[in-house]
Image (cartoon, helix red, strand yellow):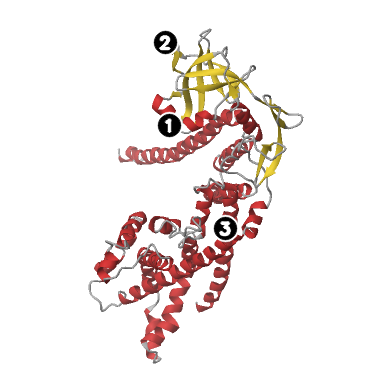
Amino acid sequence: MSADLKPQPVASSSRRSTSVRLLPLMVKILGLGLAVGVAIALSPSLIMQEQWAFLAVVWVIALVLLVTYGRSGGLPAKYLVPGGLLLVLFVVYPIILTGQLSLTNYGDGTRGTKELAISQIVGRSVTENPDSPRYNLSVGTEASTSTGPFVFLLVSQATGEVFVGTEEGLEEAPDGVVVEDDFVTEAPGYTLLTPAEINDAGVELEELTVPTDAGAIRRQGIRQAFEGVTTLQYDESSDTITDTTTGTVYSVEQVGDRELFVDENGNAVSDQSWQAFVGLDNYQRIVTDERIRNDFVSIFIWTFIFATLSVVTNFALGLGLAITFNDPRMRGQKIYRALLILPYAIPGFISLLIWSSFFNRDFGLINDLLGTDINWFGDPTWAKVAVVITNLWMGFPYMFLVCTGALQAIPGELKEAASIDGASGFTGFRKITFPLVLVAVAPLLVATFAFNFNNYNAIELLTGGGPFSPANPTAGGTDILISYTIRLAFGSGGAEIGFASAVSVVLFLITGIIAAIQFRATRGLEDVN
């Protein structure tokens, strides 16, 4: 009987091993199926929008995943491919895209194509005649109700026909459209805007005209639209726009960093332009524009000083505290260490906002404790001091943790040998402890420098880049290059994304060069080991 029972555990073990092997296989099949399914689902939309580059990228990613995980072997690739894809998508591609934008005039008024700009210019000239066809209007969108893109859902008052109007023209209404009281109330795939939402999106809707054979359709009020005639006509052969009421001809000329349709006296028919290739003009502007050049140089100097002070002060305080609390004779080390890392545990934006109130001139904690009346955020020098102090509070716990780990990794025999050789405490620290700590933390110091070189949050949430002078509201007293770049891109004077991209490329190169020099300098520490 015992002989008959022996095979049973073997069979049970075999079933368990089969189930264990089956689970990874199912996960692999589901994962690859999801990757291919996403590629298939995105393809029709990308083809309709003629986004061939994105279509190729989507399918390359899907094929790479299939080849890597759909076959046996190639174990190193299975680990490297995910990181490689993420590196390309979130690091390499943004860098390439930024470089491309830096060679264009992309920004407010230059976001679309020339064809779209011409369509908008001509569409704005639509005028209504007494016999103009009228439509009952509902506004819909396939995306955001505040930013669009929007479409007109139109019901002809004369015939009751239903249309969908886009920037491309009139289209037949899709199946399933519901019309009540001669207005579209439901349309498959579209979200209809309420009257309040139409008012909020008024600027975007004013730009929307629907071209027709007889002219164009424009919105009139919230619930009505009309088909009028255009007073401006575009001639593709001569690349000109003619005002049919006055006979004035507008041709394309370069005005600053934009191309506009202007008459013989230089008057533009519209400030609407389009995205165009400008080559190295944006980079040339950084060098030749005196105001920008002076701002860039002064801000670069402060950025370098800020990053350097942040690294030096954080490292010095963190190392000093780590040495103090690494002494075995001190009691309550765990409690003290837990208290010291509390600033690191608090979210940065909360700490920055709290410190911003501390530095308030009238009722801030700093002036109250010191009995002073320092205008921390009104004076450029004191504002810089406030930024460095706040960044020290937020950064020293990280250095404290890193240095504590590095100190505990130093063999005790080295310190004992130094003591036997007659080295004092300071000499042992200078000759043994500090070089060994520096070997461990040097790469982190370089990374910390690069982080603070682009530490936008510390500047924006504490001082907003200010204080600003009335003569130069673009560059503030505590602005670093990244905050200055963002203000150029999205400032009150309008977005200049192409120019800001050029500044970003320069900033990227500067950061990379400085980091390379720093890493090269730290090679000498390898001899310490």
- Foreground residue, 110 or 269? 269
Q: Nearer the viewer, mark 3 or mark 1?
A: 1
Question: Which residue in the protein does label 1 denote?
Answer: 200
Q: Position of residue 112 (x, y in %)?
A: 60, 36
Question: Which residue in the protein does label 2 denote?
Answer: 181
Question: Which residue in the protein does label 3 denote?
Answer: 508
Assess disc 1: are there few (<14), some (14-19) or many (≥20) residues with their C-alpha within 10 Å of its C-alpha.
Answer: some
At numbered mark 2, what does the secondary structure look like: helix, strand or loop? loop
- Foreground residue, 296 or 434? 296
Q: CA distance from mark 3 to mark 2?
A: 59 Å
Residue lying at 58% horizontally and 21% vertically, measured from the top left: 127
Assess disc 2: are there few (<14), some (14-19) or many (≥20) residues with their C-alpha within 10 Å of its C-alpha.
Answer: few
In which quarter of the view is residue 285 placed? bottom right
Q: CA distance from mark 2 to mark 1?
A: 25 Å
Q: Earlier in the sequence, mark 3 or mark 2?
A: 2
In which quarter of the view is residue 272 placed? top right
- Foreground residue, 197 or 93? 197
Q: Earlier in the sequence, mark 3 or mark 1?
A: 1
Q: Is residue 306 visible?
A: yes
Relative vertical location of residue 192 with respect to residue 55 in this rendering, above or below = above
At numbered mark 1, what does the secondary structure look like: helix, strand or loop? helix
Q: Earlier in the sequence, mark 2 or mark 1?
A: 2
Q: Position of residue 135 (x, y in %)?
A: 51, 15
Report the amino acid beneath label 1: Asp
Residue lying at 53% horizontally and 8% vertically, measured from the top left: 158
Do callouts 3 and 2 mark residues in contact (Cβ within 8 Å)?
A: no
Assess disc 3: are there few (<14), some (14-19) or many (≥20) residues with their C-alpha within 10 Å of its C-alpha.
Answer: few
Relative vertical location of residue 429 with respect to residue 282 in this rendering, above or below = below
Report the amino acid beneath label 2: Asp
